[in-house]
Image (cartoon, helix red, strand yellow):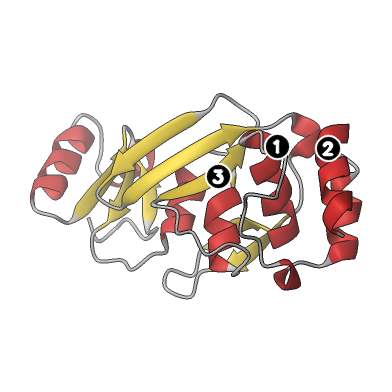
Amino acid sequence: MNNIGMPIFTAEQAGRVVKGEYANLSLNRWEKRGEIIRLKRGLYLRGDVQIDEMVIANYLYQPSYVSMETVLNQTGVIPDFAGTITSIVTGRPRNFANREGNFGYSRVRTELFFGYEMIKDVKSGLYIKIARPEKALLDYMYVRRVPKLDETRIEWEHLKKTVLLTMAKSYPNWVRKEIRRYV
């Protein structure tokens, strides 16, 4: 187990360290002893590693970036706490639940898969793909089909209006119109 240097690893990567047919047996033993945590079939987390849930979200479904309610709450744009780490993908929507948390993935068109940055997780040294707050709001409106922002508790001072308007140009007209009402 100590030969696997990465905090998150696949069964295939473990198989390179533990030769042949013993890989699955070793993974089962490590999991029972609490040395690793199964995140999903074929993907594991070392049990001795501190890691941000958002890093896990990026690894569970690739390519993806953390967005919507998770980012909006973390940046103070909305006060509502999301119990699920919300992410954006271009593939099929999915949900995962494991010991580390709940993870939800919503689909956008390929041309809307932008507006994220890479931030280093200080706990693990790995990087998190995370949406800018402006992009998270647009993703939220688009994916959740929020036609009017009147009912939402948005703290507009946490958003850069020029960035929001620029990013909104890629979204459907109904999203652009609603954003223009507020900026």
The residue at which mark 3 appears reads as 87
Left or right: residue 116 versus residue 183 is left
Write the residue at 52% across / 37% down: 105
Q: Do the residues under discs 2 and 1 have CB atoms within 8 angstroms?
A: yes
Question: Which residue is nearer to you in this view: 172 or 57?
Answer: 172
Q: Which mark is residue 171?
A: 2
- Describe the element under mark 2 as helix, strand or loop: loop
Identify the mark nearer the N-term, 3 or 2.
3
Q: Quadrant of the N terminus?
A: bottom left
- Describe the element under mark 1 as helix, strand or loop: helix
Question: Which residue is nearer to you in this view: 58 or 148?
Answer: 148
Q: Position of residue 103 (x, y in %)?
A: 42, 43
Left or right: residue 77 versus residue 57 is right
- Residue 181 visible in this rendered orientation of the protein: yes
Residue type (three-letter) at the residue carrying disc 3: Ser
Residue type (three-letter) at the residue carrying disc 1: Tyr
Identify the mark nearer the N-term, 2 or 1.
1
Write the residue at 14% across / 35% down: 25
The 10 Å Cα crowd at callout 2, few under 14, some 14 to 19, many 20 or more, is some
The residue at which mark 1 appears reads as 142
Q: Do the residues under discs 1 and 3 have CB atoms within 8 angstroms?
A: no
CA separation in Å, label 1 and label 3: 13 Å
The 10 Å Cα crowd at callout 1, few under 14, some 14 to 19, many 20 or more, is some
